[in-house]
Image: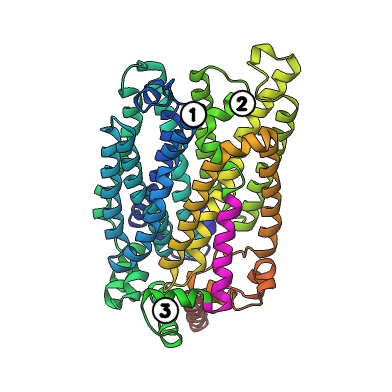
Amino acid sequence: MFWKNMKNEPKQVLNWTLWLSVLVFGLLGSARGLDEGNISGTSHQVSFENQFGLRDPNKTEKEIADALSNITAMVQLGSVGGSIIAMFAQDKIGRVRCLQQMLIVWIVGVVIQVTSHGQGQLLAGRFIAGLGIGQSVVIGPTYLAEVSPKNVRGLCTCVFSGSVYLGIMLEYFANYSTTLNVSDESRMQWVLPTSVQFIFAGLLFIGSFFIYESPRWLMKIGQEEKAMETLSKIRHLPIDDVYIQGEILDVREQVEREKQALSGTSIFSILKELVATQANRYRLFIGIMVQLLGQWSGANAVTIYSPQFFAMLGVTLRTDRMMYTAILGIIKFAASVVCAVFLIDTIGRRRSLYTGVCLQFISMLYLGIYLSIVPASSGAVEDRTASQRHAGGGAIAAIYLSGCGWALGWNSIQYLINAEIYTVRHRSLACGIIMVFHFVNQYGNSKALPYMRKSLTDHGTMFFFSGVILIGLAWSWFFLPEVSGRSLESIDEMFSLPWYLIGRRGAKLVPETSTTTQLQEDDDLAKEKKGATVHVETC
């Protein structure tokens, strides 16, 4: 699959140096996944509930629900600040140094959490951890898009989105294990799953000292010679190779064009540029709508509140809910791997998204119909009729199918497309703004779900998510451009088209014209002519 996507590009570019960089920045996605998977399980552990007053008989049901939602959503609040930090920090100190400081902040937040004995310290720890986790979704996709060869950029960047579900899956199983094997009276029941984050943060911090800085960032800050040396090391090709020269020329041309067309390097001038031109406004529109439609499709609500969702479907035993939740983690992780390896660079971004969105719609619609016929309050599985139990099994399968669709669709696109469509000058700021919007929506979604279930009812909430998914399908068909197999610099030309053509016909109207491709074609043509001349002389 790799070689098919690489077409006629040098085989040397797929090497251990590239894969190490992809592994370190790709596994950065686990930061968000580990937290989401952890809190969805630990918040329902008996020891956690006792420790932080979530079983206090003196508190009303609303007070307990508000305390739980505050604990759950505090990382999202911190992540808003983290995204803002990253949009400035990664351009000032570079992608690798920004990664290292983010990991330190994350570790400090987790230390505060595991040593907590009161709700105040726990909230502070989760907020500080969020300051680190929020940076990961800006740094990771940006770096991966900048160092990856164009024909496997989707695969490399989707390692990040896939590792989100690696983290979720591991935390689901960690919580399931401690539920079975650790006493409800022991703090270790929730401390051990939370401590899994130390392992990943430590390994990534060590790995960060063995990878290279982004050549595109080095070009942006004027270190052209170092950029060429770094790109040569990442691609395992000599500096004078036509592939390296072509890639450097593409980046240099874009950087020079931006310097000539735009003035000022302050944050305000760059922010003004993001909204001053039609092309940049369209890019911003795409980024915001991907987050809005993806976050309100219901998938993140299922991830964070998965034990409650399984309880709605009649799974009454806590250990069984943890087991079903762990299986959901496996399915999401497997789906993200399938998307990264077999779909995103082969059938393209749009078709991969269509596949995932359709699976999500079918799932949410089924859940809505099921819960309208068999309400969540109808009791345990044993008290239901045979047909209701069979339909309940289908509802559990629908949750799994929904997770599969999310991993194939919106989850891959929400990180990948933002890292691809912006120019090197605007990429950090734009991705930071979009990720702020991402976490604000995720926070709102996690806070709103309990109230939606009360006001819209459980089945009404599912129908609401189904409607959002349908809108997302129509929007992506009309507005989302296909950018697979293109250099980051050539994507810029597509946004010069009228807005109503970019999504539907942009890829056809603006063919790939990167300098690398042209130089390689010229080099291949020269070799063919030389070979033909030698053949004639021999004859």
- Residue 59 appears left or right of 299: left
- Residue 491 appears left or right of 59: right
Disc 2, disc 3: CB below 8 Å? no
Question: Which amino acid type corresponds to the residue marked 3 in the rendered image?
Answer: Ser
> Which of labels 3 and 1 is toward the front?
3
- Residue 429 appears left or right of 340: left
Name the disc covering residue 312, or none.
Answer: 2
Is 391 situated above or below 259?
A: above
Question: Which amino acid type corresponds to the residue marked 1 in the rendered image?
Answer: Ala
Q: From the top left corner, tell me how far across and down residue 127 is, in percent.
A: 35, 45
| Residue 309 drawn in magenta | no
Q: Which residues are magenta?
A: 276-294
Q: Earlier in the sequence, mark 1 or mark 2?
A: 2
Q: From the top left corner, tell me how far across and down residue 345 is, in percent.
A: 55, 56
Query: Would you name the residue on which mark 3 appears?
Result: 269
Q: Nearer the viewer, residue 277 or 354?
A: 277
- Cα distance, mark 2 to mark 3? 51 Å
Residue at 46% across / 86% down in the picture?
261
Disc 3, disc 1: CB below 8 Å? no
Question: Which amino acid type corresponds to the residue marked 2 in the rendered image?
Answer: Met
